[in-house]
Amino acid sequence: MSRKKTKTKEQSGFIIRLISWVIAVFLLIIALLGLGYYLGYEQGLSDANSVAIHKNIQREKALKKLQSAVNIKPKAEVKTPSLKKELHKVLKKEQYKKTTASHEYTKLPPVAPKREIVKSSNKPKLAIIIDDVSFKWDVKNIKSLGLPLTMSFLPPSKIHPDSAKLAAKEPYYMVHLPLEAQSFSAEEPTTLRITSSQKQISARIDKIKEDFPRVKYINNHTGSKFTSSEIAMNRLVFSMRKNGISFIDSRTTAATKVPLVMKNYGYAYIARDVFLDHEDSVSAIKKQIKIAIKKAKKYGKAIAIGHPHKNTLRALRESKHLFKEVQLVRIDQYI
């Protein structure tokens, strides 16, 4: 009898231990799955955010992924509002997070071309070009400054399809033409290359003229490789001349051949003197504004280039008192 009781106790103990092990393994699996899901979710947020603001050319795909993630029904422990908040942050950043003046170089921008010192009683002229204008909020934010700035619009693309329509509403504008860079991973889909034929370049400029019928001046978006090629620049200037358009060199490379090509055509060489927002901080941009004003005073006139970024617009707004020292003009009044 005692043997049966002992055997029964042993069996009961074994069953209890077995059940305990099963429960422990089950809880471990649940914990690992939960941890994996949490880490994957957090990593997904980080990846989505970095992709979305990483390059302009990838923006549409990244935002679609984020939007898709928002629409997925999460598990109980994951709160959807936090993901929506992350998407909101990305969208908010995208208003200002565009390609800056540092998009092509790892070092400081190439210095401005040598110019003759001008002594005159006339008030020096300063033209400020705002590149990469693409969206409605760009135009609104720039115009809110109440300054005679020259907006240079990127040609329409899937990323910014309404740029030409926005330009059409403005009394004056330029076109920011994408040209091939030495090293740049987020180029515009309509970028002209040094291998582009005369026919291809002419067709591109004809399309620019069709989309922007009142364009008189074009400056280069990126273009360190293209503008350093005399052959490529000769083809471009030839095509622009037929459409009554002049070229302003953004000087994204010190090896630019634009001065030589313009001289061959009998045109004056026009180029930027200062990049305002190569370094994206208000203090640095204000310093560049002062340098641009100093150059205008020294040479009688100067051209500065910036972008419609939050810090750039703030620096311009807070520097209004400095512009009293010069005549701030649009590019057509500069030349």
Image (cartoon, helix red, strand yellow):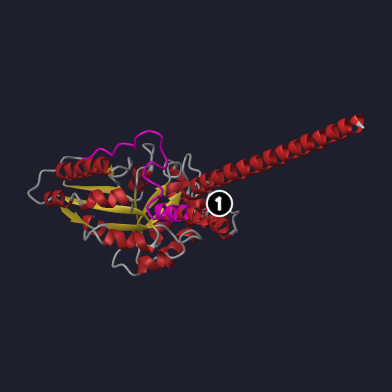
Q: Amino acid at mark 1?
A: Val
Task: List x then y, in percent, for residue 225.
Answer: 46, 41
Specify the quadrant that holds the N terminus: top right
Taking the magenta stretch, the answer to whether it contains residue 263 is no
Q: Where, by quadrant of the figure, is residue 141 drawn?
A: bottom left
Between 299 and 129, the one nearer to me in the picture: 129
Regarding residue 248, the answer to whether it shows in the image is yes
Between 11 and 291, the one nearer to me in the picture: 11
**Main secondary-structure element of the magenta-colored stretch:** loop
Point 54% across, 44% down: residue: 42
Query: Does dot 1 land on a helix, a strand or a loop?
Result: loop
Between 284 and 255, the one nearer to me in the picture: 284
Horizontal side of residue 320 vs 181, given as left or right: left
Residue furthest out toward the front: 1
Regarding residue 194, the answer to whether it shows in the image is no
Point 21% across, 58% down: residue: 147
In magenta, the rendered stretch is 86-115
Q: Is residue 153 above or below residue 116?
A: below
Task: List x then y, in percent, for residue 275.
Answer: 30, 43
Between 179 and 317, the one nearer to me in the picture: 317
Residue furthest out toward the bottom: 169
Taking the magenta stretch, the answer to whether it contains residue 101 is yes
Horizontal side of residue 75 vs 211, given as left or right: right
Task: List x then y, in percent, for residue 232.
Answer: 46, 47
Specify the quadrant that holds the C terminus: bottom left
Task: List x then y, in percent, for residue 54.
Answer: 48, 46
**Residue to which mark 1 is pinned:** 78
